[in-house]
Amino acid sequence: MNIKQLETLVLVAELGSLSRAAKATGVAQSLVSRSIGQLEAEWGDRLFERTGRGVVLSEFGRRVFPQVQLL
């Protein structure tokens, strides 16, 4: 885990979309997805649930998000 991954997590949560977060940071969507996937693998749970219009924080994501925002 690194600060860039945590910043990406916050941005995806705020924008509700991997592609919008990628566009906002000027990186490929695959890099945003990989970053989130690495955090999920490290923490052992899903951070987001897909919806028809993007992503929302999962139950686990909602629990860890306040601590991530503090960093």
Image (tube, rainbow, N blue to C red):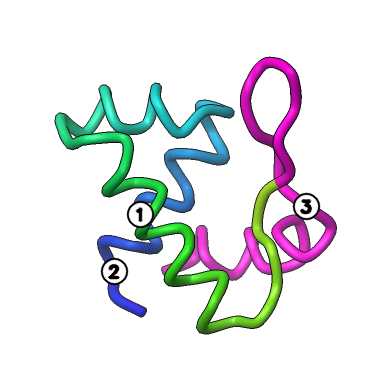
Q: Are marks 1 and 2 in contact (CB under 8 Å)?
A: yes
Q: Nearer the viewer, mark 3 or mark 1?
A: 3
Q: Residue furthest top?
A: 53
Instruction: Classify the position of the C terminus by image quarter.
Output: bottom left
- The part of the chain drawn in magenta is 49-71
From the viewer's perspective, is residue 27 above or below residue 20? Answer: below
Report the residue marked by disc 1.
7
Q: Amino acid at mark 2?
A: Ile
Residue at left 30%, top 32%? 22
Query: Horizontal and vertical percent for residue 40?
Result: 56, 70
Query: Horizontal and vertical percent for residue 61?
Result: 70, 59
Looking at the image, which is closer to me, 20 or 11? 20
Mark 2 closeness class: few <14, some 14–19, many ≥20 residues within 10 Å: few
Q: Amino acid at mark 3?
A: Ser
Report the residue marked by disc 2.
3
The Cα–Cα distance between marks 3 and 2, rounded to whole angstroms, is: 21 Å
* Marker disc for residue 58: 3
The part of the image, by quadrant, that contains residue 50 is: top right
